[in-house]
Amino acid sequence: MRLPHRDSLRKRLALLLDPISGMSINIRFFASLADRVGMREVTISSEGVDTAKDVWLACVRSMDIPGNARVAINQEYASFDAAVNDGDEVAFFPPVTGG
Amino acid sequence: MRLPHRDSLRKRLALLLDPISGMSINIRFFASLADRVGMREVTISSEGVDTAKDVWLACVRSMDIPGNARVAINQEYASFDAAVNDGDEVAFFPPVTGG
Amino acid sequence: MRVEIIECALDPMREVTRYQETLPMGSFGAMAMFVGTMRDFNESDAISSMVLEHYPEMTERHLNELAGSVADAHDLVELMMLHRVGEIHPGEPIVVVATWSAHRAAAFEACEAMVEDLKSKAPFWKKETLTGGESRWVEYNTAGPRSGA
Amino acid sequence: MRVEIIECALDPMREVTRYQETLPMGSFGAMAMFVGTMRDFNESDAISSMVLEHYPEMTERHLNELAGSVADAHDLVELMMLHRVGEIHPGEPIVVVATWSAHRAAAFEACEAMVEDLKSKAPFWKKETLTGGESRWVEYNTAGPRSGA
């Protein structure tokens, strides 16, 4: 049996963060950058967030954006000044080293 | 049993053309150029022959040197003005089409 | 066109041979191929293994777009691009790119363009484990052909 | 280093695989390979077979000098260069060049340099037989990469 309080909280969280309703931004970190910020994936409210840079500032308080960090919005490279919209996925990662 | 006359001729030919004694030039033609001149290999005396161009003139009377003909002296690319010496191998061929 | 992320062992020669067998015989005059293999040393250190992390949704999209744009830009008969992810050991192939064309210029140029992009833009990251047990992220890839470096 | 004129059927993948197995595992990070294959068409005509003539003494010398100068100019772990002569049919390989190096730039550049030289300087000549029975010498090779053509 669920506690009423927990259900209520869940509803409020869903309202705030549900990607379907378009009020949240999904954020992903990869490789050494994920290690440095201590997160791999997090969802934030899109309120007050206009650019990729704002996304970083909203969820990483412990460090500035590293000079060599890359950003992708919806799986495409973007600039830190690029606009971010509700429901977007924003990824931060270091220079790639595949191939 | 050999005929004395034939032996004598052979000796004189050897004296004239033997690459060891350094008095002859070996000439080779390849591919379409061999077809055009009607020869693949011929040996000439080196007398009066100073350059690769002289070699051609000495053995191909039916046609001028084609504009796209290449020449190699002792298996290395050379110019038609390059000096030819006793015992050299001179090859004429069209542009290569390998690979 | 075959573009794939591979999570298990990869045999480049076998994959290229098999794919080539599906192409009409005599339709191509040139095949260029590149295989990137894990070395057992990097920056003077002996390496025992490595893990290739990637950003799956972006990798898939990036590789498919890359293959499409290279196919548009070059006169190819076919192309293939396979890239490993996960744990890899020295001597094992990491990436294979192959191109088929009528003449050599298109095959070479398209092959190099894909390898260059895979090395500089596709979202893969190498984390290597030294023989001593320490592990570290590879920070940068070496420069490619004609980079002036 | 393996440089050879081949008078019988040639299986590039097998030859490269076998040669690669002799190299120290983990010693190279890049392998570039080119295979030139006989097409079944040329200048809009259907081709049934071809004969590759060469100047044996010069070919041998030229290929060995080429391999030596490319090995001197590029930072390679190994190289291989095989070239068919004699009668060849559509779909059959004519030439295979493979290079191994620590990083990709050397492998690509050396591979291309060898292919370019083989196509423009090595004394081989193709005589093709059309499906109608007529035969003709191939008069020129197509331009290579970055030739501007």
Image (spheres, coloured by chain):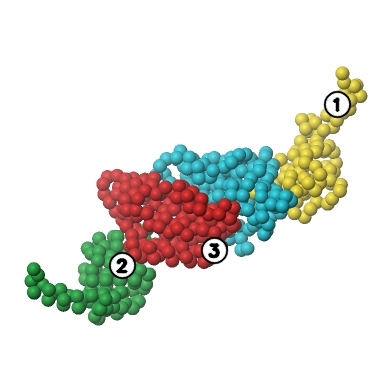
Chain colours: A yellow, B green, C cyan, D red
Side of B21 where D124 appears, left or right: right
Q: Which residue is mark 1?
A: A11
Residue D52: % across, % down: 33, 55
- How many numbered discs sit on the rendered protein? 3
Label 3: which secondary element? loop
Query: Mark 2 and mark 3: span between their CA atoms?
Result: 32 Å
Q: Residue placed at 69% from the left, 55% from the top?
A: C140
Q: Name the chain letter of the residue that bears numbered label 1.
A: A
Mark 2 vs mark 3: tell me if same chain. no
Label 2: which secondary element? strand
Label 1: which secondary element? helix
Q: In the picture, residue C9 is in which quadrant?
A: top right
From the image, state whether disc 1 or disc 2 is nearer to you.
2
Query: Mark 1 and mark 2: span between their CA atoms?
Result: 89 Å
From the image, state whether disc 3 or disc 1 is nearer to you.
3
From the image, state whether disc 2 or disc 3 is nearer to you.
3
Q: Residue placed at 19% from the left, 75% from the top?
A: B14
Q: Which residue is mark 3?
A: D74
Single out the residue that lies furthest toward the bottom.
Answer: B48
Which amino acid type is marked by label 3?
His
Which amino acid type is marked by label 1?
Lys
Q: State the residue in front, D99 or A3.
A: D99
